[in-house]
Image: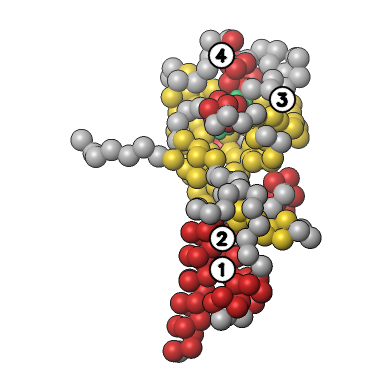
Amino acid sequence: MLSLRRTTLKYLQVRDYLRALAGSELTAGDPVPSERALCERFGVSRMTVRQAVDALVVDGILERVQGRGTFVAPPKVDLQVRLASFTEEMTRRGMTASVKVLGAGIVEAEPDIAEALQVAVGDDVIHLHRLRFADDEPMAVEHSWLPALRLPGFLDGGVPSSVYVDLGTRGLVPDWGEDTIDAGEADHDEAELLTIGPGKPVLRITRRAFTGDQAIEYASAAYRSDRYTLWVPVSRPN
Ligand code: GLP
């Protein structure tokens, strides 16, 4: 029991030391001290050092690069909880948004999509499956559904690079909406697309967006939680 507590304390010491180092002396891309150096410094086993590093990798503070070692990760993107598009959010952060279209077409609305979009079951809806990048790094996998009847010719010129810019040109950019955010694990396909391991944590964000009183989008996305921090302004209840 006592030795278990000692090991836990040592683990926390290593973890906190590396966390502090990553936030002070070292910057993104710098290598962290070697496993051996950390073992010697703290008098712990390699396993303890690895556990501490693992925890910081999951938190997005460090990253392991195959065959090269462990480095301080780039700072997380603070994703504001507001009705912004992916392109707007990345531009605000000084990053370049890009997209890989994994699938796009008109499908018949399934009951849950029909309900979310306030259309009849079986009505035409536009379905987009997209991998979103910031500065060429994969960040999120998104499925979006939009009511096809309200968006004639939406796919005629190919999938727009920004859906919200396209909606804006039609005077249909959403003006309010609701997001729900859940903790989840990347499934096999998401893990591959996001270049993270299967089962790694992701933020599952679903959105219903409205223009006036009409639903214009229902979306379901998996964001890398090692690269995102949700930023939520909070105020006292009235
Ligand atoms: C965010 C939202 C999605 C929305 C997308 C539009 O990622 N979570 O629901 O579809 O923005 O972004 P863009 O205009 O860059 O296509």
**What's under tag 1, amino acid-wise?**
Ala
Secondary structure beneath label 4: helix
What crowding class fits label 4: few (fewer than 14 Cα within 10 Å), some (14-19), or many (20 or more)? few
Using the numbered discs, state the Cα–Cα distance from disc 1 to disc 2 in whole angstroms: 7 Å
What crowding class fits label 2: few (fewer than 14 Cα within 10 Å), some (14-19), or many (20 or more)? many
Give yes or no for contact between labels 4 and 1 (Cβ–Cβ under 8 Å): no
Using the numbered discs, state the Cα–Cα distance from disc 2 to disc 3 in whole angstroms: 42 Å
Q: Is residue 208 above or below residue 212?
A: below
Find residue 119 and report its horizontal and vertical position in percent: 56, 24
Residue 52's tag is 1
Give yes or no for contact between labels 2 and 4 (Cβ–Cβ under 8 Å): no
Find residue 53 and report its horizontal and vertical position in percent: 60, 65
Of badges 1 and 3, the one in the foreground is 1
> Which residue is farthest right?
67
Give yes or no for contact between labels 4 and 3 (Cβ–Cβ under 8 Å): no
Residue 106's tag is 3
Q: Earlier in the sequence, mark 1 or mark 3?
A: 1
Query: In terms of depth relative to the viewer, which is nearer, 14 or 88?
Result: 14
**What's under tag 2, amino acid-wise?**
Leu
Residue 56's tag is 2
Q: Earlier in the sequence, mark 2 or mark 3?
A: 2
Secondary structure beneath label 1: helix
Splitting the image into 4 quarters, where does residue 123 fall? top right
Would residue 185 be seen by someone viewing this image from the given angle?
no
**What's under tag 3, amino acid-wise?**
Ile
Quadrant holding the C terminus:
top left
